[in-house]
Amino acid sequence: MRVDKFIINEKASIQKLIIADIKQLINNKNLEPGDKLPSERVLADKFRVPRNIVREAIQKLEFYGLVYSVPQSGTFVANIGVTAMNGMIDDIMDLETPDFKSLVETRILLELKTVCLAAKNRSQEELKNIKAAMEAYQEKVLNGESAVQEDLLFHLAIARASGNTTLRTLMLFITPGIITNFEKHHFCGKDQAIKDISQHEAIYKTIKEQDAVAANAMMKTHFLELYKYCNQNENNQN
């Protein structure tokens, strides 16, 4: 593959080409689970691209569990089979950067579950952490400062208290995109931020009382305005 055959302006596009070639390499050489991929240097020479581009493409495959790295040994094909790997790589290459509405919808789905689990499973220590995050948010808002990051930390504390590491991982994965989009769209204005203080307190109370049903209901209420905003913003763009 020669990258100069293509008019490419974004690094992500180059990565897709590298990933497609790695997929082809796996298929052509019939690499089995546990087989070692060629080194970054060999792949960079083969594809005629800088090594850092190859490294980032491999890191992306590693993030999704398709390959794994062993220090001082190299990168190996994961134990999922070539057929499944081909399908997953195709899906990865089709992925686009999630828009604001997609992030919000995913966040709501996750948090309606994590808040229920937090109400059931939280420890006293985790309850203290949720309260501390809640108070940090309150302090920022009442001082007239932006509290977007403190808001997300409050919700991440709830995810931690759920006891479900997969849900927590997913929350951590989408959090940077949410913070960036909140600041871009200026959703958290002063009035909304003040309103969120009382809603945070109500959510905290349901978790403290271990009332999963009430916790779920309060979280739905908490996200109602955000969900409306996303729909209105999407309609305005269409």
Image (cartoon, rainbow, N blue to C red):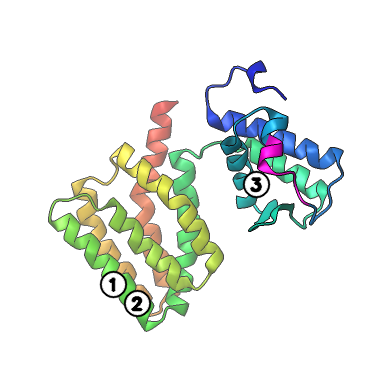
What residue would you read off at disc 2? Answer: 127
Q: Are marks 2 and 3 in contact (CB under 8 Å)?
A: no
Which tag, 3 or 1, sits closer to the chain's start? 3
Q: Quadrant of residue 141?
A: bottom left
Q: Position of residue 55 (x, y in %)?
A: 60, 42
Residue 106, compared with residue 212, is above or below; it is above
Which tag, 2 or 3, sits closer to the chain's start? 3
| Residue type pointed to by label 2 | Leu
How would you rate the neighbour count of disc 2 (Cα within 10 Å): few for under 14, some for 14-19, many for 20 or more? many
Residue 49, compared with residue 59, is above or below; it is above
Q: Are marks 1 and 2 in contact (CB under 8 Å)?
A: yes
Residue at coordinates 33% horizontally, 68% vertically from top-left?
Answer: 203
Q: Which is nearer the eye, 139 or 113?
A: 139
**210 relative position to 14: left or right:** left
Residue at coordinates 26% horizontally, 57% vertically from top-left?
Answer: 196
Secondary structure beneath dot 2 equals helix
In the picture, the disc for residue 131 is 1
| Residue type pointed to by label 3 | Leu
Q: Nearer the viewer, mark 3 or mark 1?
A: 3
What residue would you read off at disc 3? Answer: 61
Q: Position of residue 110 (x, y in %)?
A: 49, 58
The magenta stretch is 36-43
Residues at marks 2 and 3, CA–CA distance in whole angstroms: 37 Å
**171 relative position to 96: left or right:** left
